[in-house]
Amino acid sequence: MPCAAVSASRHATELLSGAGLLGLFAVVVDGRVAARLGLPGKPDPALFIEAARRLAVPPREAAVVEDAEVGVEAGRRGGFALVVGVDRSGARGTRPPCVAAAPMWWSTTSATCWCPGRPRDGAGLDLDVRGYDPEDEGLREALCTLGNGRFATRGAAAEAPAGPVHYPGTYAAGLYNRSTSTVADRRVENEDLVNLPNWLPLRYRIRPRGAAEPGPWLSPTTRS
């Protein structure tokens, strides 16, 4: 996965090189690039958009990870598919107002109500996703996948069948399908993980008091 480092600092490249991290990034857009191209700083999304352009990835297919509120705002303004805020301040209680539109806000020091995290020596990580948006459900199911290295299950709602919005799936190490297909006049053998039977179903419906028949089966998509 190609990654870019974006910073307003004129010395970002030197700092990354000194830390031995420069090779991890296909693109670096720093203060020198911004000055040469006349790009405004954050919260304007120009730096992020230039990085995406150099990666040949449209913003709608890219993610931004930021530890500053102005950076999160820049990612939101730029129309990036996912904006993740990293909170290292330890502040509790109120989500910063400028990141209200960000899907996730990550706190590395304390549990919070939007996307809480605990210190490395704590009891792990909590991911708390609020609300329901069919367009984001596939991403949330992937982020909430639960596994142990041998098998993994996507975090799909138990009452939601597979369809355009939900994709429940369980995969196990070593269980795959091998098939041969023709690509560019060559026979190519592929191995793909097999989606095991969905073991999550839990569906329910409510019968109103005095009604002869229960109502429709409930799911996040059909809720009212």
Image: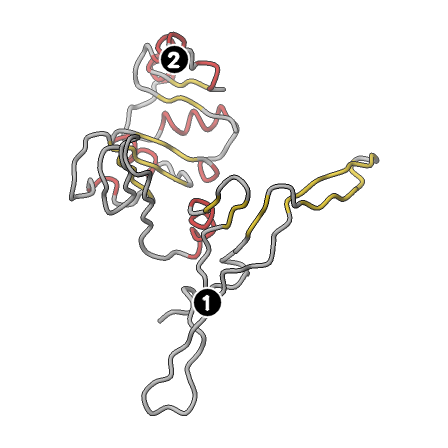
What residue is at 42 percent from the left and 49 percent from the top?
140
What distance separates the C-alpha of mark 2 from that of mark 1? 49 Å
Tell whether label 1 touches label 2 (CB within 8 Å). Answer: no
Report which quarter residue 41 is drawn in.
top left
For label 1, the residue is 202
Q: Nearer the viewer, mark 2 or mark 1?
A: 1
Please state if 156 lies on the left or on the right of 9 as rendered: right
Where is residue 189? Give x, y as percent.
77, 38
The numbered dot on residue 16 is 2
**For residue 25, above or below residue 197:** above
Q: Is residue 179 left or right of residue 171?
A: right
Give coordinates of residue 173: x percent, y percent: 60, 42
Counting from the top left corner in percent of width and height, residue 136 is at 42, 51
Label 2 Cα crowd, 10 Å radius (few <14 / some 14-19 / many 20+): some
**Amino acid type for the residue under numbered disc 2:** Leu
Above or below for 207 versus 43? below
Q: Residue at x 16, y 36 (%)?
A: 91
Residue type beneath disc 1: Leu
Query: Callout 1: few (<14), some (14-19), or many (20+) C-alpha neighbours within 10 Å?
Result: few
Q: Earlier in the sequence, mark 2 or mark 1?
A: 2
Q: Is residue 89 left or right of residue 207?
A: left
* Quadrant showing the C terminus: bottom left
> Which secondary structure, mark 1?
loop
Viewer-side residue, 193 vs 10: 193
Residue drawn at x 41%, y 9% as measured from the top left: 17
Residue closest to the eye, 77 or 65: 65
Q: Circle 2 — which element?
A: helix
For image coordinates 34% across by 45% down, the residue present is 127
Q: How many marks?
A: 2
Q: Position of residue 200 (x, y in %)?
A: 49, 60
